[in-house]
Amino acid sequence: MVILLIGTHVYLTVVLRFPQWHLFKAIKLSVTADSGSRGDVSQFGALATALAATIGTGNIIGVATAVALGGPGAVLWCWLTGVFGMATKYSEGLLAIKYRVRQPDGTMLGGPMYALERGLNMKWLAALFAVFTACAALGIGASVQANAISTICRESYAISPVWVGMATALLTAVVVIGGVRSIARVCGALVPFMAAFYVLGCIYLLVLNGHYLWQAVKLIVESAFNPSAAGGGFVGGSVLMAMRYGIARGLFSNESGLGSAPIVAAAAQTRNPVRQALVSSTGTFWDTVLICAITGLVIVSSVLAHPDITFDDGGALTKAAFSHIPIVGTPFLLVGLVTFAFSTILGWCYYGEMAVEYLTGPRWKTLYRIGYVIVVFLGAVLNLAVVWNLADCMNALMAIPNLVSLLLLSGVLVKETRHYLWERRLDEAMTEDSTPGNPAPERLGKVRHIVK
């Protein structure tokens, strides 16, 4: 999966002429309302929901684990993966709008399953993607994140997992019952807060470790290509070890290529596919290029500043680093981890229910939400060692159909990018003929019949 994903990132970066160069334009678009355009939520709301599902405990503990196992050089490989991954996230957002469908009630549905069905006529592969997504949401989205929240609360303040599970499930139910608009509204308020809160804490630690900051940067770069240069007790294995853990952390942190984010991108109010594609690409920037990179700098500089810190375990390494924030260090880390994990629960619930709606129609969506909330509670109170492995497998199975759509539709990606971006027509609205975004219930009905 690492080879398939990073290969797709590099390929799309080249054929699309480095869409990463348009980052500042993309950020501006993400906070600009595209009034008068069709869609269920604003572009920022769609981005916030996608970020809610991607910015999670992996951004904090996952990066520390990569450093503990692959050395400080893993931070650079993680960062580079995010840079190239922006092209894949751009492509996913473009196809999400290009092949989305409008329901009779006006709501928009989209994602890799619609790109596979409408763009490639691979209905069977589209159905498989939807099945994998619905299952993955119950794993990595509901049970694993709820378990992370209960574990943190139990270890930090001895709060019973039962109470944590009940509270988490109740809050989840209150938000998801309102559908995508409710989820986007909560995520739009929660994501900026939690990201700013966490980044400010990281900046404080970087200032605290200021004398070691440049040394940390040099160490990250040098040990990425020469791990023995790390010294100081850091892991000094091989370049492949640093690449493996750094790239893997970057890939699964931002979910570029996984196929999850375009499901909510399809609901965005946007006038053409490329505008939303640019907005979607900023999700990988914020998640990996910025947050994961800052976390890596904090971890490495903290180890240099405090040689007594142990770094054989990612969780312990993270706690030791943030404990140097006076008085509020532990509560700060607790709030960051809990908000990150809860936002992931909300985002993945939407992904799962959209997959179920694709397979069965809207009648089973409410039942899936109820089941999702129940799984959130169970995840908080049960031991989930096996669930972690199953969740990883489901994520991999999701990625394969999505990569098929990205690679086989790369000609469409180039054509749309040339028309709207390279020829400077970003303000142009797509016409009815330029997008298959009209209702097609008869085609969807065939898929549901096959699944049944």
Image (cartoon, rainbow, N blue to C red):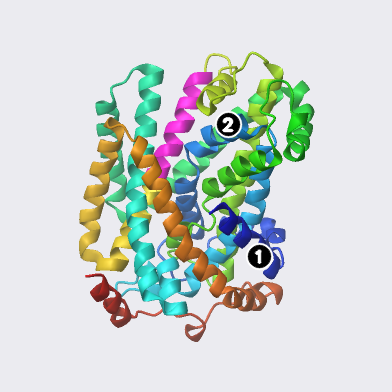
Where residue 31 sits in the image (x, y, percent)? 57, 55
Report how far apart the C-alphas of labels 2 and 1 lie in the structure. 29 Å
The one of 327 and 42 positioned closer to us in this rendering: 327
Q: Is residue 417 a member of the stretch shown in magenta?
A: no
In this rendering, position of residue 339 left or right of residue 130: right
Q: Which residue is mark 2?
A: 64
Kindly identify which numbered label has been placed on residue 11. Answer: 1
Residue 427 appears in the picture as rendered: yes
User: Which quadrant of the figure contains the C terminus?
Assistant: bottom left
Q: Residue at x 78, y 27 (%)?
A: 215
* Residue 430 vertical placement versus 27 (above, below): below
Q: Residue at x 40, y 68 (%)?
A: 113
**Mark 2 closeness class: few <14, some 14–19, many ≥20 residues within 10 Å:** many
Q: Earlier in the sequence, mark 2 or mark 1?
A: 1
In this rendering, position of residue 377 left or right of residue 399: left
Proximity of marks 2 and 1: CB atoms separated by less than 8 Å: no
**Residue kind at label 2, given as amino acid type:** Ala
Where residue 352 sits in the image (x, y, percent)? 34, 55
Where residue 427 sits in the image (x, y, percent)? 61, 73
The one of 401 and 150 positioned closer to us in this rendering: 401
* Residue 364 vertical placement versus 199 (above, below): below
Q: Please tell me in which quadrant of the rendered image residue 144 appears.
A: top left
Name the secondary structure under disc 2: helix
The one of 89 and 21 positioned closer to us in this rendering: 89
**Residue kind at label 1, given as amino acid type:** Tyr
Q: Residue at x 32, y 67 (%)?
A: 358
**Mark 1 closeness class: few <14, some 14–19, many ≥20 residues within 10 Å:** some
Residue 100 appears in the picture as rendered: no
* Residue 115 vertical placement versus 352 (above, below): below
Q: Which residues are magenta?
A: 329-345
